[in-house]
Image (cartoon, coloured by chain):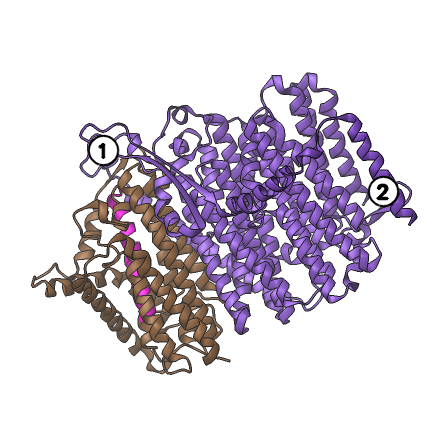
Amino acid sequence: MESFFTIALALLLAPLFPGIILKVKAFFAGKKGPPLLIKYYTLLKLLQKGSVYSTSTTFVFKLGPIISCAGAMMILLFFPLGGMSPLVSFHGDVIVLFYILGLGRFFTIAAALDTASPFEGMGAAREAFFGTLAEASIFAILILFYRMTGALSFAEYFIGARSISMAGTAGALLLLVIVSLFMLLLTENSRVPVDDPATHLELTMIHEVMILDHSGPDLALIELGSFYKLFFYSAFIFLIIFPLKAEWGLFKVPLFFGGIGLVYVAIGLVESGMARFKMNLVPKFVLTSLVLVSFAAILTMEFIK
Amino acid sequence: MNIFLLALVIIVMGGILPLLTHRYMAFTKWVYLGITMIGCITGLFAIFSAPAKLQGMAWSCSWLHSFTLAFACDSLSFFFLIPIFLICPLAVIYSCAYFDKAENSIRTAVSFFCTNVLIAAMSLVTLAANILSFALVWELMSLSSYVLVMYDYEKAETRTAGYLYFLFAQAGALLIFAAFGVAFSQTGSMAFDQFATLPAEAKLVVFFIAFLGFGSKAGVFPLHVWLPHAHPAAPSHISAIMSGVMIKMGIYGILRIYFLLASGDLIIGQAVLVFGMVSGVLGVLYALGKDNFKKLLAYSSVENIGIILIGVGLGMIGTAKGNVSMAGFGFAGALLHVFNHSIFKSLLFFGAGAVIKKTGTSQVDHLGGLMKRMPIAGRTFLIGSVSISGLPPFSGFISEFLIYFAAFHGLKHNNITLLLIILAIISLTVIGGLASFCFTKVVGIVFLGEPRSGKAAQAGEGGRLLTLPMVILAGLCLTIGIFPENFIHLAFAGLTDIVKFGRVDTATIDTVSANLTLGSRLFILIFFVILLLRKLLYKNKEITKGPTWGCGFTQGTTRIQYTGTSYTRSVVDFFRPFTVIKETKVQLRKIFPGRTEYLRRIEDIAEVGLHRGLALPLLTLLGKFRWIQHGKVQLYIGYIILAISVLLLVSFI
């Protein structure tokens, strides 16, 4: 019941947090910034509209938003939000979930190519390339976690018998994981310095250019999916830094959402302080995260016998 | 056994018939189709009616009075027989629609005959129980498939491809027979079950020689060179049979020889794993870089063979280390991937064949917008693409999950094994990512967007016979994804007779398959909920159609679309030392520039390496002996007399 409540809360609150990033960025730019609830207003506006479909497109174009949103939602069902046991969980669920995110990417790319637009093709090529590299990093993290906990599910990572914590034997290695996971968060959620959805030129975007032709409720689904995905990554990072103990009871929930807010603040700080990378630097950036985690995984040979 | 033999007899008879009545091809085709279907269904019935008493299917006969041909069936043979009898009849249905030109009736009849011989030969390969019978049916398989590749023999590239395939098939057979020879010299027995008695060093030698031989059939990097040549040359349903079923006989050989030798050496597993990783990553990389539709699919077969070998390698390492779940899930994942790949790869080849037949081009960059023009082929191809990228809720994911599962369970070991397994997991991920890259390219460039040439714009759907096999296979892909339980059990059943030490208990298998079922069904549930939600949101909304947003550019043509070449450019560049890129470009110059051009070719390092390192030196060396061949008959007779007298001297001294 509690976990049901937390998931409902997460699904409702996820669009709130990106507002925090905008606020932080506005603060550093010396501006007032949009209201905190801006994303809700955007969603509401989009949901009230109709859609314009390009004559080039087929049903694949409409599948893209649905599948990417469904995948992002599904991952939240398996995640121990607020330290509560998730609705569903099994040994090996992480593999299934990251592959379902991969399915979302497949259809987002297919939808982009469906429009016959050269710009969207460009975005699709970049997304496919960087996504492949990012997936390798994520699986390196799973390898490391398996070495540390013997587990293959989010629930076991954070609330299982051998849950990961910085205080454990190999806790120091988690520092590397946190850095690399933060880099992955920036890559997978198209944040600066990897991608900048707010530039004026479509030529320089990655994710945003792929969804140029989506409009109305379709676009709302894409936005919602991306909020959930970002929420998941932030929760992932937060729980590694600050594992929630079972004895704290319901107090865990506000702590969890507050902590996630801090991760979003960190994203805002990075975005305020950095410019977007040149496109050819992005693979190096993603590979750095892979190298960090692989290094950590190899170090476990000494830490864990 | 009798029913099984009957099935083979029916299949071969069905093949002979078109040879006799090729003048009445329009009619013969249907009879041939009917007989072959009956034969294959009888075969399926024979193996499924008696899965418990497979051993009872053994039979032998004497050949040329002094040799014995022995055949026997166990769970591994049983498992490899299923794709043979499942895919081949579908390919035969497809072929009846694909060969629709009346003037080629003799050639078509020969092709039908060889197809059926190939089906029979492949099923006998899985049953062969001694060296001689294996060698015989293996050669029969290679030769009949060679004839099938040569269907369009008046084209020069088909002849080259056929020659290359012949070379690789025969060199591979040579290595396999050499391995058998080593074994025979030690045991003095033709029977396969004597292999276990070999000394440990001999086992290693036998395994590695045979691995190279079987690897060249399976398309293991760097022995895969024939695949990307033979597939584009052969008719599409032949490519489907060869890629979906025949190259799996190489995997069967590797597994069979491994289990016969029962060697516990760790190096075997490690070597197979490394070959698997290299084939997987480089296979999909070259698939990405290819512009020819069927070449791309051929390289993707190399990739999938890599995935299968990763599973096999993990299973072997697990066996050597005594890690039961790693061994069980590794082998079972590999077997299930054999089955899955046979399904989606033939589906993709059927789709590619339909596209090539209807548009007349196999260049990916000349196609586009076919989803609207060929709705069934497009939709089934999309399902096949998602499956082959290993994405849930389709079949490819189930087998890849089992392999991942095995790999993660192997992470508890240390040192070199740990490093290899870490590499294996990361390569599986990279393969998965690049495979979705590759198949978004195919789907996106060929089926979506706008047509890039006039031929693509005028294409239309093929007939029912052409689309029916695709629909069946696409349905299977989804079925395995949503109801994986029986198929996972089937893969484990394939291991029952051969994995001797510890078995994964049924409870674990049940849990894993239940979990996978839960995962795919939950996703489908969420998908439908959102679909419903979307329907509600669009109720009473205004939906308009318009041109694609051109970012302010108003004169868009279909030529400005992204092509396969531009889509893959950055990733191909990224893997630079492994992809040899040849570019020719004419860029904008001067004030009044001419037409720009860009052409990219990606060379396969194995092909370049084999050409420079082996073929050219060999040709130079053999060129020096050309004087022996002078064309004078008297001297040839002289050679013969010389040879005979030398032999006589040798045998008398």
Name the kind of residue labelled 1 in the image.
Arg
Prevailing secondary structure of the magenta residues: helix
Residue bearing the label numbered 2: B646
Q: Is residue B607 above or below residue A143?
A: above
Q: Point out residue B6 in the picture as x, y percentages from the top left corner.
A: 79, 38
Q: Nearer the viewer, residue B369 or B508?
A: B369
Look at label 2 and name its amino acid: Val
Q: Is residue B388 visible?
A: yes
Q: Can residue B530 be seen in this snapshot?
A: no
Does B340 appear above or below B445? below
The answer to whether B232 is drawn above or below residue A189 in the figure is above
Chain B hue? purple
> Chain A is which colour?
brown
**Which comes before the other along the chain, label 2 or label 1?**
1
Name the residue beneath numbered marker 1: B589
Q: Residue at x 19, y 49 (%)?
A: A45
Q: Which class describes the residues within 10 Å of circle 1: few (<14), some (14-19), or many (20+)? A: few
Residue A237 figure quarter: bottom left
The residues tagged by marks 2 and 1 sit, at their Cα atoms, a distance apart of: 72 Å
On screen, residue B313 versus residue B356, left or right, reads: right
Residue B577 image position (x, y, % from top left): 42, 52
The stretch of residues the image draws in magenta is A214-237
